[in-house]
Image (spheres, rainbow, N blue to C red):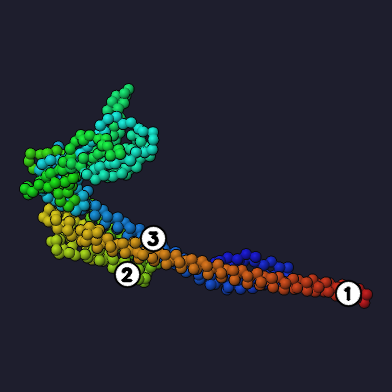
Amino acid sequence: MATSSTSPSSNIFNGNSRYSSDFQAVISRATAIASLPITQLNNQKADLGNQTDAMTGLDTKFNALQTALDQISGAVGGASFDSSVSDTSKISVTLGDGALEGNYSIQVIDPGAYASSMTASSWTADPEAPHPYKLSVGGTEYSVFATDNSIGSVVAAINSQYGDKVRAVAVNVGSSTSPDYRISLQATKLGDLAPGLSDGGESLQTQQTTGSLAQYIVNGSGSTVSSDSRSVTIATGVTVGLIAASSSAINITVTRSTSALSSALDAFATAYNAAVDEVDKQHGTAGGALAGQSLVSSLSRTLSQISSFTASSSGINGLADLGLDLDKTGHLTFNSFKLLASDLTNSAGVTAFLGGTSGGGFLKMAGDSLNAVEQVGSGLLPAAEAAVRGQVSNIDSQIATQQDVVDRMTAQLTDRMAAADSLIATMEQQYSYLSSLFSSQDTANKSYA
């Protein structure tokens, strides 16, 4: 006996009587009828498989749209800006998110100095228990817990416990043949912090460099600013590294390359149109496997919200001002010359309109909308895919249960038909014997008549 989850076997019974083929037909038909629910379940499972394939296609397109949105974010971030400095021997410039095009200036009055000290005499390691060393920075003392009194252990303890305050190194001020190891300390911040090390209250260090704060003037303000770091932020996204004092102001020009944003917007239009086309496959009576589901309508609304975003406060009213035009078919076309014109006349407005993924504007709105679609676990698509997987699992369970019922019924029916076939076969043998006997008797009677 053999069964199938989709169709009954055509050769599940072989008997010995002349009615065996009829018995086989009865069993096959009964099995086929009992298997109809399994066929229906398999059809439902196939439909769910088609829905899964459709969701996977949508997932791919919306993920690509998220990636394209991230590229726009990068194109308006610090990486898209360039800076020129009138004297690179005095300062360096690093641009980050939030930087804006413009002209800046800074005069370095004093780049500052890091306070340092060195052990006054050669380091001698006491083999006894670790000494109660104390580190002092800016007048505050800190206990140092070393594993032993060797110079390596003490240096390692200082760096691991107070590396945010000082940097300790073991230096050899002697020769390779006559080494003279000492501990050198340097404060991690500018200023007169006088880093020192003492052992049982006895100072071990001699100050070598008296630290001082950095001082500078921004944009000719006349106000001198002090800093305990040589890395100073003079505007959002504009960080200056102070290298050396300057006798006059150093000019900094920050510009943004339109080409990076242009490429990002072009890629966004392509990804957006691909997502629109994928959603459109599911619309209408002749649509795809998801036709009629609320998921499709939700995805359409998400795309519509993204393409129709407006904001008037920056002088850039909508995506059309950036060269992204929405046509009657719901697709975006990109005009790089339109973006160039807007960026030349209102670069700050372009930046404000786009905003950031966490700071408002188009990027924030579009990012939140796409997260609502793709968020792991709670997004529209992940939740829908999980629901389909649950239905498939439930159908698999029903198929297994129904198949077990069909198998038991087929086995019982086969046993009954086998018993009937055996009985008929026996009767057929008896009939054949009696018929042969009567035939022989009739022949004998005719011979002696």
Q: CA distance from mark 3 to mark 2?
A: 17 Å
Q: Which residue is mark 2?
A: 297
Circle 2 — which element?
A: helix
Q: Position of residue 32 (x, y in %)?
A: 58, 71
> Dot 3, how many residues are within 10 Å of its Cα: few (below 14), some (14-19), or many (20+)?
some
The local secondary structure at tag 3 comes to helix
**Mark 1 closeness class: few <14, some 14–19, many ≥20 residues within 10 Å:** few
Sequence-wise, the earlier of marks 3 and 2 is 3
Near-viewer residue (346 or 265): 346
Choose between 103 and 186: the one closer to the eye. 186
* Residue contact between numbered discs 2 and 1, judged by CB atoms under 8 Å: no
Q: Residue at x 28, y 25 (%)?
A: 174
In this view, 212 is above or below 234 = above
Circles 1, 3 touching at the beta carbon (< 8 Å): no
Residue 441 has which mark?
A: 1
Q: Confirm or deny contact between disc 3 and disc 2 (CB under 8 A).
A: no
| Three-letter residue code for mark 2 | Ser
On screen, 435 above or below 118? below
Left or right of 394 in this view: 294: left
Q: Is residue 268 visible?
A: yes
Residue positioned 34% across, 68% down in the render: 296
Give me the C-alpha separation between circle 2 and circle 1. Answer: 89 Å
Tell me where residue 92 appears, x and y as whole percent: 17, 42
In the rendered view, does 192 fall on the left or right side of 427?
left
What's the residue at 82%, 74% (across, down)? 435
SS of the residue under disc 1? helix
